[in-house]
Image: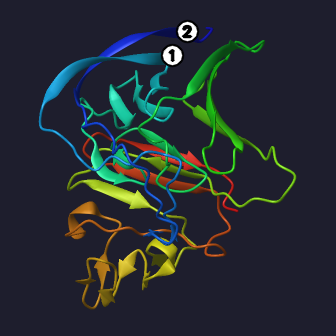
């Protein structure tokens, strides 16, 4: 069976933010989650609303006999969601509304799906439209390419999303070009959302012994966390708390795997209520 590709409008209730500030923000020394918070030449939006409208988004759907995934090029080129057709399980959480929070570098950011962050986090253009083209491949797979010239150093970056016939896999391939004559730094970080509850368990590689906050500002044993995790929201996990189970995490927190912590190439989560889960496979380097 070949893969079906459709492109059209998808109507989603949306809390539209107010217009961005008309004056530029020259925040050269602003810190942002351990990275530079330089914003110019992007506009900054710091005002949200509680009013919803039904908004039509350009949507691309890639579907085979096993999975269906939806992409939204207008929202930073993110994967909006993906479902396992054999059991109806959303292995990538699809939000039913677009309700931004002021988390992004330029202001609005939307939870859910997969956010492709570059040249730093959270993607400066995460709430802005990207270019998108689609391609049918000789092996029967289909690809949607979403990309941009980033606003700071004019590097070119894109993500190629491919679904293959006969496979329960969504492939994301990052492609970055330095179009200048000098070396430039960048990062690429994929932020995947899943629906969690009391019977959801995260699975890090078994050789992981420690977790850390953004920029390694705090480090703690993982998965059994001990003592105070000294993040922006400190919490005392006592003599030992298995934080791989979501009900044991009592407040919003970040736990990441630092470089050299693992020689394995996966992260996973399992929903014991649905008897289904999600695995991400990528180069741990």
Classify 10 Å Cα crowding around label 2: few (below 14), some (14-19), many (20 and above): some
Tell me what residue is drawn at x 68 percent, y 68 percent: 263
Where residue 41 sits in the image (x, y, percent)?
53, 48
**C-beta proximity under 8 Å, tags 2 and 1:** yes
For the C terminus, the quadrant is: bottom right
Where residue 237 sits in the image (x, y, percent)?
26, 84
Image height check: is 265 above or below 87? below
Where residue 46 sits in the image (x, y, percent)?
28, 50
Q: Nearer the viewer, residue 176 or 2?
A: 176
Q: In the rendered image, which quarter is residue 234 located in?
A: bottom left
The local secondary structure at tag 2 comes to strand
Mark identifier at residue 252:
none
Where residue 191 sits in the image (x, y, percent)?
47, 49
Tell me what residue is drawn at x 40 percent, y 21 percent: 85
Tag 2 residue = 4
Tell me what residue is drawn at x 63 percent, y 70 percent: 262
Image height check: is 236 above or below 183? below
Tag 1 residue = 63
């Amino acid at each position: 069976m070949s893969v079906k590709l459709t492109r059209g409008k998808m109507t989603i209730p949306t809390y539209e933010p107010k217009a961005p500030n008309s004056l530029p923000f020259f925040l050269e020394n602003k810190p942002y989650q351990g990275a530079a918070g330089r914003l110019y030449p992007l506009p900054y939006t710091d005002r949200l609303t509680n009013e919803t409208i039904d908004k039509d988004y350009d949507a691309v759907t890639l579907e085979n006999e096993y999975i269906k995934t939806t992409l939204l090029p207008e929202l930073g080129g993110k994967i909006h969601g993906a479902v396992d057709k054999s059991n109806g399980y959303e292995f990538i959480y699809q939000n039913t509304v677009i309700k931004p929070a002021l988390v992004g570098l330029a202001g609005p950011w939307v939870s859910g799906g997969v956010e492709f962050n570059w040249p730093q986090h959270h993607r400066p253009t995460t709430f802005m439209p990207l270019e998108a083209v689609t391609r049918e491949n000789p092996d029967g797979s289909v690809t949607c390419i979403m990309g941009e010239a980033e606003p700071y150093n004019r590097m070119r970056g894109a993500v190629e999303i491919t679904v293959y016939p006969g496979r329960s896999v969504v492939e994301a391939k990052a492609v970055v070009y330095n179009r200048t004559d000098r070396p430039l730094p960048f990062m690429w970080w994929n932020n995947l959302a899943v629906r969690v509850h009391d019977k959801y368990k995260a699975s890090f590689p078994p050789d992981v012994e420690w977790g850390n906050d953004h920029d390694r500002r705090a480090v703690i044993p993982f998965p059994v966390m001990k003592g105070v995790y000294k993040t922006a929201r400190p919490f005392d996990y006592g003599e030992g708390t298995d934080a791989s189970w979501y009900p044991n995490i009592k407040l919003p927190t970040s736990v990441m795997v630092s470089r050299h912590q693992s020689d394995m190439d996966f992260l996973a989560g399992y929903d014991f209520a649905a008897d289904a889960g999600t695995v991400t496979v990528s180069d741990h380097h």
